[in-house]
Amino acid sequence: MHNQIGNLWNGSYENLSTPDADTLLVKLNNEAAMLFLPVTIFLAFLMVIGIVGNVIVCLVYCKRKRKSTPDLFILNLAILDLLTCIFGIPMEITDLCLSYTFYAPAACKLLRTLESTTSMASALTLVIISIDRYKRICKYGESFSIKKVKILCVVAICTGFFLSWPLLIIVGKKTVDVGVSGIKGVDCSVSDEMRKSRIPLVYYIVVSLCFVVCLVFVIFVYVRISIFVKRTKANRLRYVGSGDLSNSSTGQQHIQLVVLKSVNMESIQRIDDNIHYPNPVSQENDQTLPRISRVTRKSSSVKVTRTTAIFVVVTIAFIISFLPFLITMVLRNIIKDIEKNMSEPMMVFYKFCLKCFFINNAINPLIYSFLSKRFRGDVKWLFSKYVCISRNAFP
């Protein structure tokens, strides 16, 4: 792509003075910026949606006086997403607009490290969430305490930084061949000093493996949860089917019920209650007790499914948004100078694949809005509150 743009200007510009060379470099940079304009608009849209959405999520969950463990997880993800939308996406937009004239290596190092930290911390947070879901559902309510969740979220962020700090050394100023003899551009990528070293390749392989292991682990845990829930439902239906009122040998009514209760509105517990009633039991009781059992099971099941479904959808969105990026990064490390012979449409698609993981940072608030009735109610309350305040302030 660099050669294609540069070839338009090559030939008659071989012996340029420094001012002319700088002017031509700016023109080439502007052409590249126009080529990537669709990607820039796409990122700007994600940035606006992400900032607004994640600010609302942070306000909603910070306002809650009694926070549950899912509230803390969602708040942690929202803060990480907000940081990415405020710092990471503008950095990528700048990189697209300054493809040949990125003369800020310090900003390149810091912002790329921040991007990687938030992405890795989000992946680790999803791992912790999956473990919490497993403990709550499959271990009958045994879950992380509020204090432990706070510690684990901090550990996830610190681990994300630990896995990302080498970027402070690896990335920086990269000299770019623009296709015009005597003119070189500067990009934010693996620095010239590190391009002949094996360190960047080893680092990206290790980080990619860690990332993939996290995602595979999360998928495995949710599959285990799904299998457990299906088996539990099958057993519950079988038990309830045999739980009709019948006379026992002692002349008492014996009812066997299986009830799913929620701990903190989230977990599943199986309880086999042997309830004895002296004879006679009225026909009304005979009909009411199984009906109460069905209502209890239904409401408990909805609570568990809704909370877990939110995190499952968030995880799926995370994986889908990162897949094109991971595949493109692998191809870029396998195929040397992969960008050199790309057509312009292919180059735009290539950039889309490299940037599409930012979808994850903008989409989570939309997921909460669609799947959480409580979140929608809190957002309405929040807006009505601030509307009332603004009306009182400006009558």
Image (cartoon, rainbow, N blue to C red):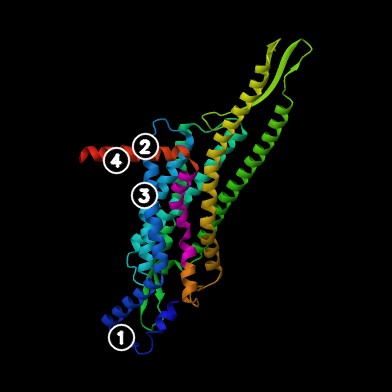
Other-residue count near label 1 (Cα within 10 Å), few / some / many at <14 / 14–19 / ≥20: some
Which residue appears at 73% of the width and 31% of the height?
238
User: Could you tell me how far apart the alpha carbons at marks 2 and 1 are, in whole angstroms?
Assistant: 64 Å
Give the residues in magenta: 351-370
The residue beneath circle 3 is 52
User: Could you tell me how far apart the alpha carbons at marks 1 and 3 are, in whole angstroms?
Assistant: 48 Å
The residue beneath circle 1 is 16
Q: Is residue 270 magenta?
A: no
Q: Secondary structure at mark 1?
A: loop
Task: Pinpoint residue 108: horizontal percent, then vertical percent.
Answer: 37, 61
User: Could you tell me how far apart the alpha carbons at marks 3 and 4 are, in whole angstroms?
Assistant: 17 Å
Is 294 positioned to the left or the right of 303 in the image? right
Q: Quadrant of residue 255?
A: top right
Residue 178 vs 157, above or below: the answer is: below
Among the two numbered marks 2 and 4 on one chain, the one whose residue lies closer to the N terminus: 2
Q: Quadrant of residue 369?
A: top left
- Disc 2 to disc 4: CB gap under 8 Å: no
Q: Secondary structure at mark 3?
A: helix
Amino acid at circle 2: Trp
Give the label, 4 or 1, closer to the camera: 4
The numbered disc on residue 381 is: 2
Amino acid at circle 1: Leu
Among the two numbered marks 2 and 1 on one chain, the one whose residue lies closer to the N terminus: 1
For the residue pair 367 and 326, the one nearer the viewer reads as: 367
Task: Pinpoint residue 340: horizontal percent, then vertical percent.
Answer: 48, 76
The numbered disc on residue 387 is: 4
Amino acid at circle 3: Val
Residue at the right extreme of this rendering? 249
Among the two numbered marks 3 and 4 on one chain, the one whose residue lies closer to the N terminus: 3
